[in-house]
Image (spheres, rainbow, N blue to C red):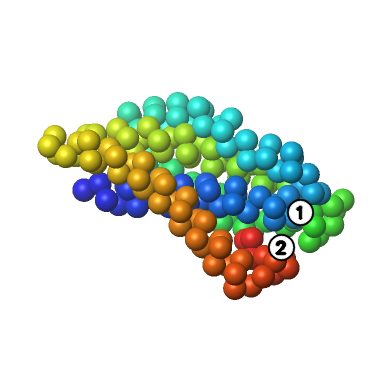
C-alpha cells in the first residue's frame, strides 16, 4: 500500500514550502531585513539535497525504501517543528547568544530538511515503482508529483488563512511559527 508514502510526500513538501511562503517573516525575524541572506538560508536545502540522496539511497538499498521514507518524514517534521521553536534575533536581540543560536540552528535545520528532501525523492519514486501494480504504474508515479504540488498548495492555503485571521503584526511576532 503506497498511500501512506504519498501522504508523507505531501507533508514533506508542505514543510519545505512553508519557509519560502514565509520569507518576509523569516527575513525580518532572523536576517536583519536582508532578502539575500534569507534566500541563501533557503538555498541551504538545495545544497544538502544531493548528499541526502546519496546517504538515504544507500540506506534504502540496505534496509528498504520504507525505512528511508519514514526517516525523511520524521526528519522533516523534526526540522520544521525545530524551526518554529527557535529563538529569533529580532525577539531575543541580535547580539545575544540566544539570538545568534537561533540563526545558526535555523541554518542547520534547513540542511536537515535538504538532506531529507534529497533522500525522499529517490526513496518514494523507487518504493512506488516497486509496489505499484503494472497496469497502474504510470498513474501511481504521477501521484508523486501530484502530492508534492498538493503540499505546496496546502502550505499556501494554511499561511493565507493565518495571515487573514491574525494580521501582519501577529504573523511577524508568532504566526510565522
Above or below 19: residue 85: below
Please report contact status of discs 2 and 1: CB closer than 8 Å, yes or no.
yes
Q: Residue furthest right?
A: 95
- Secondary structure at numbered mark 1: helix
Q: Which residue is mark 2?
A: 172
- Residue 12 visible from this viewpoint: no
N-terminal of the pair, mark 2 or mark 1, is 1
Where residue 106 appears, as percent x and y from the top left, is 66, 47
Q: Can residue 156 be seen here?
A: yes
In depth, the one of 56 and 136 nearer the eye is 136
Q: Which residue, given by chain and number where applicable, does mark 1 sit on?
A: 28
Q: Residue at x 63, y 54 (%)?
A: 22
Mark identifier at residue 139: none
Indicate the position of residue 111 as horizontal and vertical percent values: 59, 38
Q: Is 124 situated left or right of 116 in this image?
A: left
For label 1, the crowd category at 10 Å Cα-Cα, with few meaning under 14, some 14 to 19 and many 20 or more, is some
Relative to the observer, which residue lies in front, 40 or 68? 40
- Residue at 36% across / 41% down in the picture? 145
**Quadrant location, the C terminus:** bottom right
119 vs 85: above or below: above
Residue 81 is situated, as x and y percent measured from the top left of the image, at: 56, 56
Instruction: Give the residue displayed 52% in from the left and 56% down from the top.
Output: 156
Q: Residue furthest left?
A: 135
Amino acid at each position: 500500500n503506497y498511500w501512506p508514502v504519498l501522504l508523507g510526500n505531501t507533508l514533506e513538501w508542505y514543510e519545505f514550502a512553508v519557509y519560502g511562503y514565509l520569507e518576509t517573516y523569516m527575513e525580518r525575524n532572523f536576517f536583519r531585513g536582508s532578502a539575500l541572506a534569507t534566500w541563501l538560508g533557503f538555498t541551504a536545502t538545495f545544497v544538502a539535497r544531493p548528499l541526502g540522496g546519496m546517504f538515504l539511497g544507500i540506506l534504502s538499498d540496505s534496509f528498504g525504501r520504507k525505512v528511508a521514507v519514514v526517516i525523511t518524514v520524521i526528519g522533516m517534521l523534526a526540522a520544521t517543528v525545530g524551526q518554529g521553536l527557535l529563538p529569533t534575533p529580532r525577539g531575543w536581540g541580535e547580539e545575544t547568544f540566544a539570538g545568534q543560536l537561533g540563526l545558526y540552528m535555523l541554518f542547520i535545520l534547513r540542511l536537515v530538511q535538504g538532506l531529507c528532501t534529497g533522500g525522499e525523492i529517490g526513496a518514494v519514486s523507487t518504493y512506488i515503482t516497486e509496489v505499484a501494480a503494472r497496469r497502474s504504474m504510470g498513474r501511481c508515479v504521477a501521484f508523486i508529483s501530484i502530492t508534492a504540488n498538493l503540499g505546496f498548495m496546502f502550505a499556501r492555503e494554511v499561511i493565507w488563512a493565518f495571515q487573514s485571521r491574525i494580521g501582519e503584526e501577529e504573523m511577524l511576532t508568532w504566526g510565522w511559527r
